[in-house]
Amino acid sequence: MSMHRQAIGYLVVALVLSMSILFPTSWGIAANPKVDLNSATLEQLESVNGIGHDTAEQILAHKKAHGAFHSMDELLKVKGVGKVRLKALAEAFTVSDQSIRPEDVSQK
């Protein structure tokens, strides 16, 4: 019987390893949700693969100077982000709807 249990143990290990090979993307997305460009902090931006401290600061500076991002393509205006880099980062970011800004709402 011990040989049978050992075989089952190997089968379970093989099954778990094959699942990680077959479904790496879905597990990675669940572990790393998309970062919203319009609400992200410096630390959240730096947590994205391919974004270092300097680029994160450039993103925040651009947002401060020009307002919220309306699309991912606006990242091309950020120093250090080109077409190739934008394509690599597209899955890591999201852009929230910033059509109504707090300063546009009149205070009553």
Image (spheres, helix red, strand yellow):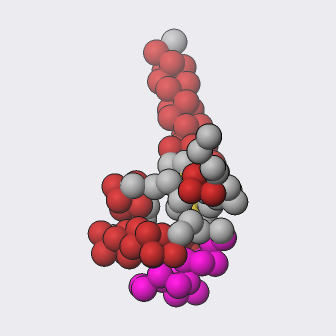
Residue drawn 35% across the image and 59% down it: 42
Q: Nearer the viewer, residue 24 or 21?
A: 24
- Is residue 27 visible in the rendered structure shown here? no
Please give the range of residues in magenta: 71-87
Q: Is residue 58 above or below residue 2?
A: below
Q: Is residue 89 above or below residue 32?
A: below
Residue drawn 50% across the image and 26% down it: 9
Residue drawn 55% across the image and 25% down it: 8
- Is residue 77 visible in the rendered structure shown here? yes
Q: Point out the residue furthest to the front here.
A: 108
The rendered magenta stretch, by its main secondary structure, is classed as: helix
Q: Residue 74 magenta-drawn?
A: yes
Percent across and percent down for residue 30 are 57, 43
Q: Where the C terminus falls, by quadrant?
A: top right
Q: Point out the residue furthest to the left here.
A: 53
Percent across and percent down for residue 103 are 56, 56
Q: Is residue 63 found left or right of 42 in the rendered image?
A: right
Q: Is residue 60 above or below residue 22?
A: below
Q: Residue 89 magenta-drawn?
A: no
Q: Nearer the viewer, residue 13 or 61?
A: 61
Q: Is residue 23 above or below residue 91?
A: above
Q: Nearer the viewer, residue 5 or 63?
A: 63
Q: Nearer the viewer, residue 36 or 63?
A: 63
Q: Point out the residue furthest to the top here.
A: 1
Percent across and percent down for residue 68 are 56, 66
Residue drawn 55% across the image and 37% down it: 16
Q: Quadrant of residue 76?
A: bottom right
Q: Number of callouts in the render?
A: 0
Percent across and percent down for residue 10 are 50, 32
